[in-house]
Image (cartoon, rainbow, N blue to C red):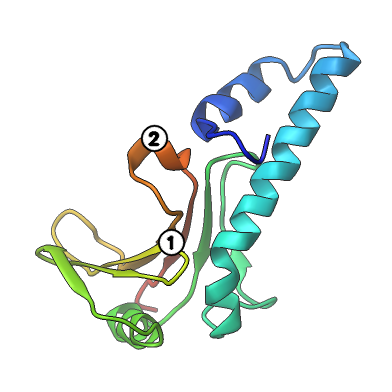
Amino acid sequence: LADKVIDWSAFDELSRQVANINNSAIRDLIFEGTRVLQKAHDELEKPARELGIVDRKTKNTTTKEKGSTREYTKPGGQEALDRDFDKFKGEAIPLEPGVELKTLPNGNKIVKRSKTLKNDIPTLEFQPEGKGNSSGGIRVKVRYPKL
């Protein structure tokens, strides 16, 4: 499973649909898929942990257990987002107003979404190498509400 590109949103929907099935083979596949998704999220957020952006005290605010996006909330607003984004080496490439991108040596991307009309909470988003569905839709997001 780890070598396949999986639409994790579809996996999440399927796992909810088959949650009450007694077939052990299906339960085993869902368990294995969930384990692979957790491992992919762990690997994607590893640079954020290494730089102290998220740690064991950072609250995981993900609303879907098996969802393709793992979310954290970290106070501090735009200022904290700017500090954390600057911790990553490399040139920031503007994508659109309020959105900048840095690419890590392994090809993973870090997207800084500042507070704009479309995005009311500043967010740092970690995306795996690849574009769109080729990355399976996996994301790790750190949201920075102003508290």
Q: Residue placed at 37% from the left, 85% from the top?
A: 89
Provide residue 25's location: percent of width, then percent of height.
86, 16
The amino acid on which the numbered mark 1 sits, given as a three-letter code, is: Asn
Provide residue 52's location: percent of width, then percent of height.
56, 85
Q: In the image, 1: left or right of 84?
A: right
Instruction: Decide: few, some or many residues near mark 1? Use Cα within 10 Å; few <14, some 14-19, many ≥20.
Output: some
Q: Earlier in the sequence, mark 1 or mark 2?
A: 1
Position of 8 relative to 139 (above/below) = above
Residue that badge 1 annotates: 108
Q: Residue placed at 39% from the left, 72% from the top?
A: 144
Q: Residue placed at 44% from the left, 79% from the top?
A: 75
- Say what secondary structure mark 1 lies in: loop
Provide residue 142's location: percent of width, then percent of height.
45, 66
- Say what secondary structure mark 2 lies in: helix
Q: Residue placed at 56% from the left, 52% from the top?
A: 62
Residue that badge 2 annotates: 133
Quadrant where the C terminus sits is bottom left
Residue nearer the viewer, 60 or 95: 95
